[in-house]
């Protein structure tokens, strides 16, 4: 694979058996950023979800005779950090450190994965912590609105489907300590995607060590999933969270495109014009927020798309109960306008500059670039493929953009998901389904 220069850094992605890795080399760098993700390919079931969440906690809860506190103390002494997280069917270990502490930190990392303790007391603590977190999730209106949106679009087998907190709490009770030995073996055997950012010497050393400690074997078969729920009409979801002051809103629809589809770059460009994530440049921010004063922030983006899996587009915002009907009305108006009339030549020119500049800002940071390379590898794109994809997005024509917006931003099959103090406006909200 060809090494690409990115500002003051050099980026290369490669694959060797069931280890895929990215190297982000920044001459003179004193810090190191490392991400390692194991793709377990577990099915999207409540039991598997809570098992991976608990495992991500227990993996940091003592290793090789060191207790959780002792292990953390050694990391703190080095000025290093190791975190473990679980999303979908993936388990990610993130390591940040000074290059002068590379050998000691990697020794702790290797100890963590070679000799995890999985003690009864830590298991009970992790289980209770997770249940407490899930109870709190019942009040997270923003997350609920998103989950309800996804569940209207996708079947339970899909990675994009979210189970409710009560279902997951029940699943926690069924997990046994012995299950963690099985998932740890799966963590080691599964395909690893690793990205390392730092000086050339440090990055080469890390990749060399990973080749030694990563067990080789055949890549595990991916679990089949039935993605789209088949929703073919406008759908309104309301969920009462009386403790909140505002109503969180997620509006979106199924997007039958993967990274392999030639229409995706044009759609992403057009969606950025509608509601670019972050900042004030999108139409939604200039109208629903600036001109009409109905919300503080409103953005749009695409989620859940990989090399072989379709996803969905989504608008995220919130309104006060007194403004929610006006806010949803204004949002749907802007979606219809851009879908039916498309973007202007002025917007095409302006957003080419905006999108390129935003990409350059990310690529000026070692940690941000390392995270970007890692996330692209997770969805199936090498660095060269990602760069080619972005160039297609910069160069797509207004005709191409307007065509895909008209096809996929269909307000007749849209889902409007709301969560918050719904009771006083529920009757008005459900009318949007008509």
Image (spheres, grey):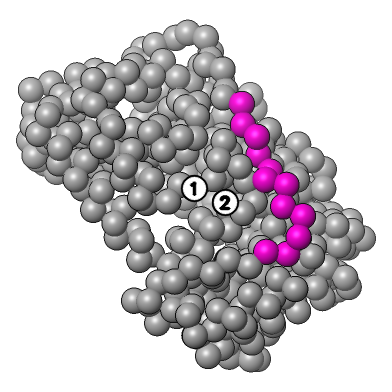
What's the CA distance linking mark 1 and mark 2? Answer: 6 Å
Residue drawn at x 64%, y 51% is 153
Q: Is residue 84 left or right of residue 310?
A: left
* Frontmost residue, 4 versus 231: 231
* Frontmost residue, 325 versus 335: 325
Q: Looking at the rendering, in which quadrant would you find the N terminus?
A: top right
Assess disc 2: are there few (<14), some (14-19) or many (≥20) residues with their C-alpha within 10 Å of its C-alpha: some
Residue 132 location in percent, x, y? 23, 53
The number of callouts visible is 2
Q: Main structural element of the magenta stretch: helix, strand or loop?
A: loop
The quarter of the displayed image where residue 55 is located: top left
Q: Is residue 416 left or right of residue 16?
A: right
Label 1 belongs to which residue? Answer: 162
The quarter of the displayed image where residue 203 is located: top left
Residue drawn at x 27%, y 24% is 180
Determine whether the residue tagged by mark 2 lies in a helix, strand or loop.
Answer: helix
Q: Is residue 79 left or right of residue 12?
A: left
Circle number at residue 20:
none
Whether residue 414 is visible here, answered yes or no, is yes
Q: Looking at the rendering, in which quadrant would you find the C terminus?
A: bottom right
The quarter of the displayed image where residue 75 is located: top left
Determine whether the residue tagged by mark 1 lies in a helix, strand or loop.
Answer: loop
Q: Where does the magenta region start and end?
A: 224-235
Q: Mark 1 or mark 2, which has the lower sequence index?
A: 2
Label 2 belongs to which residue? Answer: 151
């Amino acid at each position: 694979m060809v090494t690409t220069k990115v500002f003051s850094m050099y980026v290369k992605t490669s694959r060797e058996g069931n280890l895929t890795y990215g190297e982000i080399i920044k001459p003179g760098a004193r810090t190191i950023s490392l991400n390692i993700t194991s793709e377990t390919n577990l099915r999207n079931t409540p039991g598997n979800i809570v098992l991976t969440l608990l495992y991500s906690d227990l993996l940091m809860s003592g290793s090789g005779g060191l207790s959780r506190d002792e292990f953390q103390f050694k990391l703190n002494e080095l000025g290093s950090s190791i975190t473990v997280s679980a999303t979908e069917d993936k388990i990610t270990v993130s390591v940040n450190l000074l290059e002068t502490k590379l050998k000691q930190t990697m020794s702790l990392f290797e100890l963590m994965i070679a000799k995890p303790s999985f003690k009864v007391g830590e298991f009970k603590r992790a289980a209770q912590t997770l249940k407490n977190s899930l109870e709190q999730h019942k009040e997270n209106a923003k997350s609920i609105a998103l989950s309800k949106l996804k569940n209207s679009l996708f079947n339970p087998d899909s990675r994009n489907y979210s189970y409710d907190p009560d279902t997951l709490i029940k699943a926690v009770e069924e997990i046994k300590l012995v299950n963690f030995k099985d998932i740890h073996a799966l963590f080691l055997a599964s395909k690893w995607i690793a990205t390392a950012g730092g000086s050339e010497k440090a990055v080469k050393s890390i990749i060399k060590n990973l080749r030694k400690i990563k067990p080789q074997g055949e890549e595990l078969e991916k679990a089949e999933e039935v993605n789209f729920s088949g929703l073919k009409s406008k759908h309104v979801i309301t969920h009462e969270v009386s403790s909140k002051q505002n109503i969180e809103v997620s509006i979106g629809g199924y997007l039958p495109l993967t990274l392999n589809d030639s229409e995706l770059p044009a759609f992403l460009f057009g969606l950025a014009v509608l509601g670019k994530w972050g900042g004030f440049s999108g139409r939604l921010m200039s109208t629903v927020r600036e001109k009409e004063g109905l919300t503080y922030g409103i953005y749009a983006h695409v989620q859940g798309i990989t090399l072989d899996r379709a996803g969905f587009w989504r608008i995220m915002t919130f309104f006060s109960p007194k403004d929610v009907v006006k806010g949803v009305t204004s949002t749907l108006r802007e979606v219809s306008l851009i879908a039916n009339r498309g973007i202007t030549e002025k917007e095409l020119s302006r957003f080419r500059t905006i999108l390129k500049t935003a990409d350059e800002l990310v690529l000026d940071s070692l940690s941000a670039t390392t995270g970007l390379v890692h996330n692209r590898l997770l969805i199936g794109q090498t660095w060269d493929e990602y760069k080619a994809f972005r160039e297609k997005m910069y160069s797509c024509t207004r005709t191409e953009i307007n065509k895909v917006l008209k096809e996929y931003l269909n307000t007749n099959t849209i889902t409007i998901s709301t969560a918050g103090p719904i009771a006083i406006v529920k009757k008005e909200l459900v009318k949007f389904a008509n």
